[in-house]
Image (tube, helix red, strand yellow):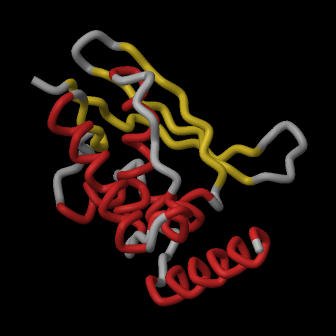
Amino acid sequence: MPDDWQVTEVTDTADESGQIEAWEITLTRPADGVTLAMFLPKVAIEATAVACGLTSTDEAIDVLLHRAVHPIYEPNLPESNPWQMSGEEARAAVLERVERCKRDHAAVATAAPKGRTAAARKAADVLTPLRSVRIDPVTCATVRLEQQRALLRARA
């Protein structure tokens, strides 16, 4: 049975220079209390969506959170380079990897928000800051194509 991990805290932070805005995300495995701290630059959500051909903020967040825990279970599993595939292939590969992690090793979710009403629970969602990043699938696909063209020109 896969382990459960919960996102228990998200804190605004930056790198040591103060120039790269980021979040520090705390993941906790309730079964044994093990915690994992994850430093996530704020540009990572959109960059992951572009690189992997993802179409929503929630997909990108899911990929990033599972990338943080998957190496605990399969440290030597190579990750495919999304830039060597079409956008559709990259998306399928990364989503299959997340599903493999969920099925065989660990699922990451937010800690259940506490509140009496649906609105209070939504307000208590620790991933709200990450979900404020808006992914435009058309823009991401366009940027991805431009990046792939630049890579092809650089190889020529």
In the rendered view, would you say 124 is above or below 31?
A: below
Above or below: residue 49 compared with residue 71: below
Q: Which residue sits at x=73%, y=53%? A: 21
Q: Residue at x 66, y 76 (%)?
A: 147
Q: Position of residue 153 (x, y in %)?
A: 75, 78
Q: Nearer the viewer, residue 42 or 72?
A: 72
x, y percent for residue 96:
26, 52
Pick out the residue farthest to the left.
1
The quarter of the image holding the N terminus is top left
Number of numbered discs visible in the structure rendering: 0
Is 91 situated above or below 135? above
127 on left or right of 12: left
Residue projecting furthest to the top: 32
Q: Residue 3, percent across and down?
A: 21, 24
The percent coordinates of residue 19 (x first, y second) are 86, 53
- At 30% from the left and 46% from the top, the residue drawn is 98
Q: Write the residue at 44% across / 23% down.
A: 76
Up/down of 119 relative to 4, above or below:
below
Q: For the C terminus, which image quadrant?
A: bottom right
Q: Nearer the viewer, residue 22 or 150?
A: 150
